Structures are given as C-alpha cells and as structure tokens.
Image: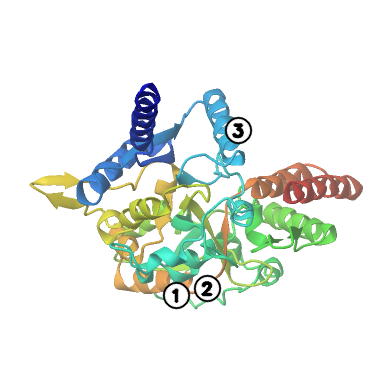
C-alpha cells in the first residue's frame, strides 16, 4: 500500500512539473530596435497582437541612445546570439556615414552578417504572407537582401546623394557622364556642380566593392590609391568653381522637398556614377529574423504586418474606431526614401516631369549596398590622404587602411 501511495505521489508530482513546464513554454518573441523608433515598434506590436495573435508575448529589446549604454547592451545581445539565442527579430538602422560622432550598431556590416548564418532565409514564408506583397517594393533594392540561401534581409529605406539642377528653357542639354572615369575627365562647370565634394561620400566611386561570398575586396590597393588621387584632384578643382544657386544637393528627402516647392521649373536629376558605371543605392534601415528563433512563423507574421501596404503607406489599421499606426519616420533613415514604391510616391508630390526624371534615375541603379564600417574606412582613407601631398605617404595610408578592411572581412 505504501509503495502504491508513493508511486501515486510521484505521478502527481510529474504531472505538476509538466504542467508548470507547459506554462513556461508559453510563446514569446523579442524585437530588437533602435531607441529612436521604439514607440512606433510598440504600436506595431499592439496592431499585430490585436489582429493576429493576442496570446504570444512580444517584448522590445531597445538599443539605448547613449553610446556607453548602447555598447553594454550590444555586447550582451552579441553574446546571446553567439550562444544560440538573442532577439527573434531585428528592425535596425545601418551605420550612418554622414555624422562625425562615433557610432555603435548591432551589425556594423549587414551584408557580412547576411553571409554569416545570422539571419533566417525567408522565402518559404512569403507564400503564406497575409499582408506583404513583395512586388510592391523596388525590386533592385529589395533583392539586395538575398544571398545564395534566399531572402535573408528585408530593406525598408535607402538613399543616395542626389543632385537636382533647375533646367532653363534656353539651355542646351549637357551630355551626362555614365561612369566615374567620364566624370573625372570632364572639365565642364555644369558637371562639376553635379559632383560636389567627396569628403562625405568617397565610397560612391566604387559601387559594389566587396565580394562577401569569398570575403575579398574587388579593388586592389593601386585601384583605391588612383581613385583617392582622382577625387582629391577633382575636389580641388571644384573649390575654385562658384556654386550655382540652381543646384540642390543632398540626401533624397531634402532634395525632393525642394523640388516639391519648385514645381513650376523643370529639373535634371543626377547621382555620381561609379567606376563600373551606373549608380549605387544604400540601404539605411532593414528588418531580419534571427536564425536562432524558436518561433519563425510568428516572427515572420510580425514582419508580414510591418511590410504591409497599410503600414508602409502610413495608413495603419482601423478596428473599433481605433487606429493602429506604423514604424516609419524618425532617425536618419527619415532622410532616406522608402523601398515600398507606393509609399515612395505618396511621400512626394512632384511635377510630372520631375517624377519621370526620378523614375529614369532609379532605373540607373546598378548596385545596392548597406552602409557599413568599410564605408567609414574608405572615408578615412580619403580624408587622411587629402591633406598629404607626398605620394609615398598617400600610398602608406591607403595600404594601411586597405589591410584593415581586409582584416575586417576575414574576422
């Protein structure tokens, strides 16, 4: 009898432990975001739980704005990822090469991370998407998130350095260069106005300069030295040219707003081409799923809603007279343009002529990159060489930074 009672107690205890274990296995997801748009991320979570899954617990992992606090948090997250854990979803900005202060980001080279088994390939989930229509996105930019395994990253914003020139009716058209070599050999003042100062965008000259499959640079030291010297020579000539009031230059958001305010004029639009020809666009915000996630379907479902027309076009979801918002805006990505083409056209009210010119310009995108620590190295290379007149010193600078870039790829 005693043994039966003991056996019964053991069975009851096991059932109790199993029940507790079931409760502990309640589904939960974490989303890693930058602090700039944590509130919009909470709105996204609220919308997803309301319309899709109210039982799954979703929490944010917010990267602090202060650098010292951010470094501690990022070290913690990287350790978790290396240990087989980490946030389920990433919605993050890339490095911002247009600021001088030191930056800390979770992935300082997103493309390298794409080829490092960190992100989950998403192709098999697209067919079951409830909201996302991948054909609503600029295909050249969207496809930049693909590796040999499939779509590992979903781009949200991109930019390039855009120049717009007011076109006078009596002006003869100027032949626009289609490669950096043509730009460099052209002494026309008009062309110089289009290609202003490379201190903040020297990387534009290279297009796609890294092969992440092999982990190698696609340009030699001599190639990079030649581009540095050409850009310095070109910039020195540019400084002697009077700036044209009819030229608008900067990131797309600012320039396109200028065009909105000048609809009566016709404009020529231009982006500096690379050595390989065509122009390079840069992804500034992206989303991805951690390959370590235990709940890939639920994680994709959240990104499915994020990439919906309703969220991307700032319409949101309405139910019971309550409006559920979106995740766009804020951070430097706000100076970029959305990859969602409907959102792109909704964001700007351009004249028909300028809209056609912009469409033609985007058709010239031949390379897409994600801003990275390697771009910062190229800027360092240019800016250090700019104030050195001795060629041997320039060679030494280029060689040192070139080797540093190779080491980063090999890590």
Residue that badge 2 annotates: 364
- Who's the residue at 26% across and 42% down the image? 55
Q: Are discs 1 and 2 less than 8 Å apart at CB?
A: yes
User: Which x, y percent locates residue 208?
Assistant: 65, 63
Q: Residues within 10 Å of mark 3 (few under 14, many from 20)?
A: few
Instruction: Return the disc, 2 or 3, that comes first in the chain's sequence.
Output: 3
Depth check, mark 2 against mark 3: the one in front is 3
Q: Residue at x 37, y 21 (%)?
A: 2
Local SS, label 3: loop
Dot 1 crowding, Cα within 10 Å, few <14, some 14–19, many 20+: few
Q: Evaluate whether residue 256 shows in this view.
A: yes
Q: Looking at the image, is mark 3 or mark 1 earlier in the sequence?
A: 3
Q: Mark 3 vs mark 1: give the one in front.
A: 3
Label 1 to label 2: alpha-carbon separation: 7 Å
The percent position of residue 215, horizontal first and vertical second, equals: 74, 58
Q: Position of residue 332 (x, y in %)?
A: 45, 43
Instruction: Check disc 1 and report the residue beneath it.
Output: 360
- Label placed on residue 18: none
- The reply to whether discs 3 and 1 touch (Cβ–Cβ < 8 Å) is no
Residue at 12% x, 50% y: name it.
319
Q: Is residue 297 above or below residue 269?
A: above
From this view, report whether residue 36 is shown above or below residue 280. above
Give the labeled residue for mark 3. Answer: 102
- In this rendering, position of residue 301 left or right of residue 121: left
Residue at the outermost left position: 320
Please tell me in which quadrant of the rendered image residue 345 appears. bottom left
Q: Is residue 290 left or right of residue 341?
A: right
Task: Determine if residue 100 is in view.
Answer: no
Residue at image point 41% right, 49% down: 295
Q: Position of residue 290 (x, y in %)?
A: 50, 48
């Amino acid at each position: 009898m005693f043994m039966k009672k003991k056996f019964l107690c053991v069975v009851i205890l096991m059932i109790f432990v199993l029940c507790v274990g079931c409760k502990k296995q309640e589904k939960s997801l974490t989303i890693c975001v930058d602090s700039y748009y944590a509130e919009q991320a909470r709105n996204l979570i609220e919308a997803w739980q309301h319309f899709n899954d109210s039982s799954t617990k979703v929490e944010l992992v917010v990267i602090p704005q202060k650098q010292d606090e951010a470094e501690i948090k990022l070290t913690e997250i990287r350790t978790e990822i290396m240990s087989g854990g980490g946030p389920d979803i990433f919605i993050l900005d890339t490095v911002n090469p247009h600021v001088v202060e030191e930056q800390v980001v979770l992935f300082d080279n997103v493309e390298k991370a794409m080829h490092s088994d960190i992100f989950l390939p998403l192709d098999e989930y697209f067919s079951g998407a409830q909201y996302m229509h991948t054909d609503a996105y600029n295909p050249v930019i969207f496809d930049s998130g693909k590796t040999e395994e499939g779509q590992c990253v979903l781009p949200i914003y991109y930019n390039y350095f855009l120049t717009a020139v007011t076109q006078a009716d009596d002006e003869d058209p100027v032949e626009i260069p289609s490669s950096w070599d043509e730009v460099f050999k052209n002494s026309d003042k008009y062309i110089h106005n289009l290609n202003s100062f490379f201190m903040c965008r020297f990387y534009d000259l290279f297009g796609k300069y890294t092969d992440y499959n092999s982990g190698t640079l696609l340009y030699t030291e001599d190639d990079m030295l030649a581009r540095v010297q050409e850009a310095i020579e070109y910039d020195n000539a540019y400084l002697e040219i009077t700036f044209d009031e009819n030229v608008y230059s900067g990131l797309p958001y600012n320039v396109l707003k200028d065009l909105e305010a000048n609809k009566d004029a016709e404009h020529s639009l231009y982006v500096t081409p690379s050595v390989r020809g065509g122009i390079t666009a840069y992804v500034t915000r992206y989303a991805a799923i951690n390959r370590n996630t235990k709940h890939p379907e639920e994680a994709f479902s959240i990104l499915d809603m994020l990439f919906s027309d309703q969220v991307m076009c700032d319409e949101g979801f309405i139910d019971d007279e309550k409006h559920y918002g979106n995740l766009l805006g804020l951070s430097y990505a706000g100076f970029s343009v959305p990859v969602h083409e409907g959102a792109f056209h909704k964001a700007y009210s351009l004249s028909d002529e300028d809209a056609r010119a912009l469409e033609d310009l985007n058709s010239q995108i031949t390379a897409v990159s994600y801003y990275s620590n390697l771009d910062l190295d190229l800027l360092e290379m240019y800016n250090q060489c700019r104030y050195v007149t001795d060629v041997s010193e320039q060679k030494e600078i280029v060689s040192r930074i070139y080797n540093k870039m190779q080491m980063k790829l090999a890590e």
